[in-house]
C-alpha cells in the first residue's frame, strides 16, 4: 500500500511539474497574445494614482492593439495585461510579482505605482530575469542598485526641482540664493532633496532652513514661521499631495511672503482647483504636460492624448497616466526590434531604446533611468477665479513667462 | 534641534496661542471618548476615524456648494445616527465584555471605516475652503487664522451645550446614573440599552463636529484618524473620566506641548513626541498607582 501511495504521489507530481512547465513556456505568449503582468494599487492609500496608472496602461493597450499590435517574426500579436491589486502594500506587491511570474508565467512586467512599491518588486523581477518597464517609480535609489532588467520611462526624482534652483539663481542675477526647504521622510522626497543639495552646491547657494516633514503631516506652521523670520529667496516643499495642500493652505493663512515657491505633486493634488487663487504663482515640477510638442504615431501629441484619454475615462489625464501609456509604446518598440520573445533579447532591445513618444524622448541610462527627457516646471496662474497650470520652463516649451517674484500678500486681492 | 524659538521669544506667543486653540479641539474629541469610556467602559479605537468621517461630511457639503462651516451643524446630526447604528450593529455585543474585546471590535470598525472612506471619497488628500481671513499682531509676526479661532469657539460652545444637557435633561441624568452604576440604574427603571446607544451617538456627534472643524483648518485623508485617537486617549488618561475641566486643560496642555515640540525638535517629531509622552504618562501613572497600593497595604 505504502509503495503504491509513493508511486501515486510521484506520478501526480510528475504530471503537475510537466503541466507547470508547459503553461509557463506558453504563458508569456498565448496564441497571438503577449501577456504582460502588473501589480497596481487599486485599493489603499495609492488607489487614486494606481487607477491613473491602470487607465494609462489600458488606453495604450487598446490603442496599440487597434493599430495592428506588435509585429514579431512577420506575425501580429496583441497585448494583454494581467492585473492584481497590491493594496498599496510593498509586501503584497512583492508576493504578487512572484505570483505573476511563477503561477501566471508572465515573462514581461509593467511597473506598479510609487517608488516604494517599485522598490519592492524590482528585486523579484531581477531574480527571475524578467524585463520590467516601469512608469511610476522615480526614486534615485532604484537606479543605483545595478538592476539589469529595470527600465523607467520617467525622469529620476533628484531632477524634479533642480531646475527651480537654477531658475532662482538666474532671477537673482546669477548670484547664489538662500534656500528654505521642507521634505517628507520618504524615499521619493528625500531624493528630491538630494537634487536640491546638488543644485545648491553647484550654484554656491546656502540652505538656511532644512526641515523634515512627517508622514501624517497636516500642519507645517513651524517651518513657515521660520520662513517668515529668515526670509529665504526660495521655499521648496515636497511631501506628496498632503505637503502641497498643507503648504498652500497655511502660506495663505499666515500670509507668508516668499519670492519663489517650488513644489512637487501640484497636479496630483489638483492644487489650482482645490486652493484656487491661494495657489497662484506656485511653481511645480511635472513629468509631462499636454502642451509639450513631443509626437508619436499612436497618440499623436500631448493634446490629442489628453482628448482621447478624457473621452475614454471622463477626466483629464494626470502625468501618471501619460507615463504609464508610454511604457507600453516602449515595450512594443523593443519587441519589434528584438524580433523575438526571448527574455534576454527583449531586455537588450529595451536597453538600446532611443525613441520619441508623445510623453517625451526615451533613452535609458546605465541604471535604467530615462536620461533623454527633462523635467518641466509649470506655474499656477489665475484669470479671475479660474486657475491653470502654465508651462514656464524649460524655455523650449514655455507657453507663459515665469512670474517672479511672487507679489506680497498685502498686494494680492 | 532648532532654537529659533528661544532667539525670538515672540514666537513662543505664537506657539502657545496655536497650541491652546488646537488643544481645545483635541479636548472636544477627548471629551467624547471620556464620556463613552466612562459610561460603557469601551476604549474606542475608531474615535479618530469617526472624526475623519465627520470631516468628509463637511467636505461633501463644500463640494455641493454649501459653506463647509455649516458642517458643524449637519455633520453631528448625521454622525449621531451613524454612532447609534454602530452601537446597535456592533458595540451592543461587546459592551459588557472584556476591555480587550471592545478594543479589538473598535479596531475592526476603524479599518472598515478607513476602507469605506477610501472607497467613497478616494485616497486623495482634500481640503474644504472656508475663505476665512487672518488677523496679525506685532508687525505681522503673530498670525491667527480665523479658521482656528472659529474651530476653538465652536468646540467650546458644543462643550457648554453638552454639559448643560448632561446636567438638566432626562437623558443626561440617565447617562450619568448609568455611568455611576449600570445595574442600579437598570433596577430603577433606566433603559440602559437606550442610554448606551445615545452615549455612543453623542460621542460620534462630537467627533462629527471636530471633523467638520478639521476639514476647515487642516487636511483630510482616509488614513489620518489614528493620531486623533491617540491624542484623545492620552488626554483622557491624564484627565481621568468624567472631569471636563481637567479634559479641557490637558487638551490645551497637549496642544501647547505639540507646538513647542514642533518648533524645537522639528515637525517630523510632532506626532512622535505625542506617542513618547503617552508612554511616559502610562509608566508614570502606573508607578503612582503601584505606590498607592503599597501604601494601602
Image: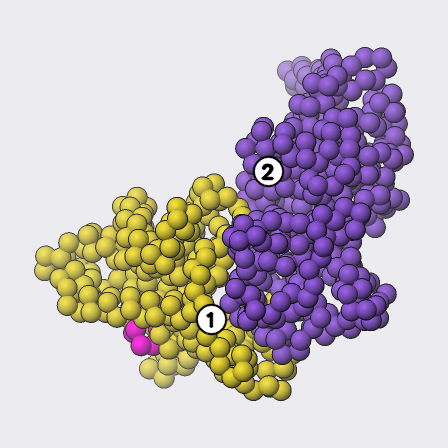
Chain colours: A purple, B yellow
Residue A373, percent from left and from top: 81, 44
**Chain under label 1?**
B
Residue A251, percent from left and from top: 56, 66
Residue B30, percent from left and from top: 37, 66
User: For mark 2, what is the residue?
Assistant: A316
Label 2–label 1 contact, CB within 8 A: no
In the rendered view, does B149 fall on the left or right side of B84? Answer: right
Q: Nearer the viewer, residue B33 or B53?
A: B53
Residue A201: tell me if it is visible.
Answer: no
Residue A310, percent from left and from top: 59, 33
Task: Identify the residue shown where x is 45% and y is 55%.
Answer: B128
Callout 1 environment at 10 Å: few (<14), some (14 to 19), or many (20+)? Answer: some
Looking at the image, the residue that sits furthest to the left is B188
In the rendered view, does B166 fall on the left or right side of A280? Answer: left
The local secondary structure at tag 1 comes to strand
Q: Main secondary structure of the magenta part?
A: helix
Task: Identify the residue shown where x is 51% and y is 73%.
Answer: B258
Task: Identify the residue shown where x is 73% and y is 19%.
Answer: A67
Task: Identify the residue shown where x is 73% and y is 13%.
Answer: A31
User: For mark 1, what is the residue?
Assistant: B134
The quarter of the image holding the C terminus of chain B is bottom left
Magenta-span inclusion, residue B244: yes
Magenta-span inclusion, residue A283: no
* Range of residues picked out in magenta: B243-247
In the rendered view, does B233 fall on the left or right side of B91? Answer: right
The local secondary structure at tag 2 comes to loop
Q: Is residue B136 above or below residue A31?
A: below
Q: Is residue B4 above or below residue A356?
A: below
**Chain under label 2?**
A
Amino acid at each position: 500500500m505504502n509503495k503504491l501511495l509513493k508511486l501515486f504521489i510521484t506520478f501526480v507530481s510528475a504530471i503537475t511539474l510537466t503541466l507547470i512547465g508547459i503553461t509557463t513556456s506558453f504563458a508569456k505568449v498565448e496564441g497571438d497574445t503577449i501577456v504582460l503582468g502588473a501589480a497596481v494599487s487599486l485599493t489603499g492609500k495609492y488607489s487614486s494614482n494606481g487607477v491613473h496608472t491602470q487607465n494609462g496602461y489600458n488606453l495604450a493597450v487598446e490603442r496599440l492593439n487597434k493599430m495592428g499590435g506588435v509585429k514579431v517574426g512577420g506575425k501580429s500579436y496583441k497585448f494583454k495585461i494581467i492585473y492584481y491589486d497590491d493594496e498599496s502594500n510593498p509586501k503584497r506587491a512583492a508576493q504578487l510579482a512572484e505570483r505573476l511570474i511563477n503561477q501566471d508565467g508572465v515573462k514581461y512586467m509593467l511597473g506598479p505605482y510609487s517608488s516604494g512599491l517599485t522598490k519592492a518588486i524590482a528585486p523579484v523581477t531581477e531574480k527571475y530575469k524578467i524585463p520590467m518597464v516601469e512608469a511610476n517609480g522615480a526614486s534615485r535609489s532604484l537606479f543605483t542598485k545595478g538592476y539589469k532588467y529595470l527600465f523607467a520611462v520617467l525622469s529620476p526624482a533628484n531632477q524634479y526641482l533642480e531646475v527651480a534652483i537654477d531658475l532662482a539663481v538666474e532671477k537673482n542675477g546669477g548670484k547664489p540664493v538662500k534656500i528654505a526647504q521642507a521634505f517628507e521622510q520618504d524615499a521619493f522626497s528625500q531624493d528630491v532633496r538630494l537634487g536640491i543639495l546638488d543644485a545648491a552646491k553647484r550654484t554656491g547657494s546656502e540652505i538656511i532652513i532644512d526641515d523634515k516633514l512627517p508622514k501624517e503631516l497636516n500642519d507645517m506652521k513651524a517651518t513657515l514661521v521660520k520662513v517668515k523670520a529668515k526670509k529665504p529667496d526660495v521655499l521648496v516643499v515636497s511631501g506628496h499631495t498632503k505637503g502641497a495642500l498643507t503648504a498652500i493652505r497655511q502660506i495663505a493663512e499666515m500670509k507668508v511672503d516668499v519670492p519663489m515657491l517650488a513644489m512637487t505633486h501640484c497636479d496630483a493634488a489638483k492644487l489650482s482647483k482645490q486652493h484656487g487663487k491661494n495657489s497662484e504663482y506656485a511653481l511645480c515640477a511635472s513629468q509631462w504636460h499636454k502642451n509639450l510638442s513631443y509626437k508619436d504615431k499612436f497618440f499623436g501629441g500631448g493634446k490629442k492624448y489628453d482628448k482621447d484619454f478624457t473621452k475614454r475615462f471622463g477626466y483629464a489625464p494626470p502625468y501618471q497616466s501619460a507615463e504609464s501609456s508610454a511604457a507600453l509604446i516602449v515595450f512594443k518598440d523593443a519587441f519589434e526590434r528584438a524580433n523575438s520573445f526571448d527574455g534576454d533579447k527583449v531586455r537588450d532591445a529595451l536597453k538600446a531604446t532611443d525613441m520619441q513618444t508623445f510623453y517625451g524622448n526615451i533613452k535609458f541610462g546605465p541604471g535604467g533611468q530615462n536620461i533623454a527627457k527633462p523635467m518641466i516646471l509649470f506655474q499656477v496662474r489665475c484669470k479671475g477665479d479660474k486657475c491653470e497650470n502654465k508651462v514656464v520652463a524649460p524655455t523650449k516649451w514655455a507657453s507663459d513667462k515665469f512670474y517672479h517674484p511672487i507679489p506680497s500678500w498685502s498686494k494680492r486681492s | 534641534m532648532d532654537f529659533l524659538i528661544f532667539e525670538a521669544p515672540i514666537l513662543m506667543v505664537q506657539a502657545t496661542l496655536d497650541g491652546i486653540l488646537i488643544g481645545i479641539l483635541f479636548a472636544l474629541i477627548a471629551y467624547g471618548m471620556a464620556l463613552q469610556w466612562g459610561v460603557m467602559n469601551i476604549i474606542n479605537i475608531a474615535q479618530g476615524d469617526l472624526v475623519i468621517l465627520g470631516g468628509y461630511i463637511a467636505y461633501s457639503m463644500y463640494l455641493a456648494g454649501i459653506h463647509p462651516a455649516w458642517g458643524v451643524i449637519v455633520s453631528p446630526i448625521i454622525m449621531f445616527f451613524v454612532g447609534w447604528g454602530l452601537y446597535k450593529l456592533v458595540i451592543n455585543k461587546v459592551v459588557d465584555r472584556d476591555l480587550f474585546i471592545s478594543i479589538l471590535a473598535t479596531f475592526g470598525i476603524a479599518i472598515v471605516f478607513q476602507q469605506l472612506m477610501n472607497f467613497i471619497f478616494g485616497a486623495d488628500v482634500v481640503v474644504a475652503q472656508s475663505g476665512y481671513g487672518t488677523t496679525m499682531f506685532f508687525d505681522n509676526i503673530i498670525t491667527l487664522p480665523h479658521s482656528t479661532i472659529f474651530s476653538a469657539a465652536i468646540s467650546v460652545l458644543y462643550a457648554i451645550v453638552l454639559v448643560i444637557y448632561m446636567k438638566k435633561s432626562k437623558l443626561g441624568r440617565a447617562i450619568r446614573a448609568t455611568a455611576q452604576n449600570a445595574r442600579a440604574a437598570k433596577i430603577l427603571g433606566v433603559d440602559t440599552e437606550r442610554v448606551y446607544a445615545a452615549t455612543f451617538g453623542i460621542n460620534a456627534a462630537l467627533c462629527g463636529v471636530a471633523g467638520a472643524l478639521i476639514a476647515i483648518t487642516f487636511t483630510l485623508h482616509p488614513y489620518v484618524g489614528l493620531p486623533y485617537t491617540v491624542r484623545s486617549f492620552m488626554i483622557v488618561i491624564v484627565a481621568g473620566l468624567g472631569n471636563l475641566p481637567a479634559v479641557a486643560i490637558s487638551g490645551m496642555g497637549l496642544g501647547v506641548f505639540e507646538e513647542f515640540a514642533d518648533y524645537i525638535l522639528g515637525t517630523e517629531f510632532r506626532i512622535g513626541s505625542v506617542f513618547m509622552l503617552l508612554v511616559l504618562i502610562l509608566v508614570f501613572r502606573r508607578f503612582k498607582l503601584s505606590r498607592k497600593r503599597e501604601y494601602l497595604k
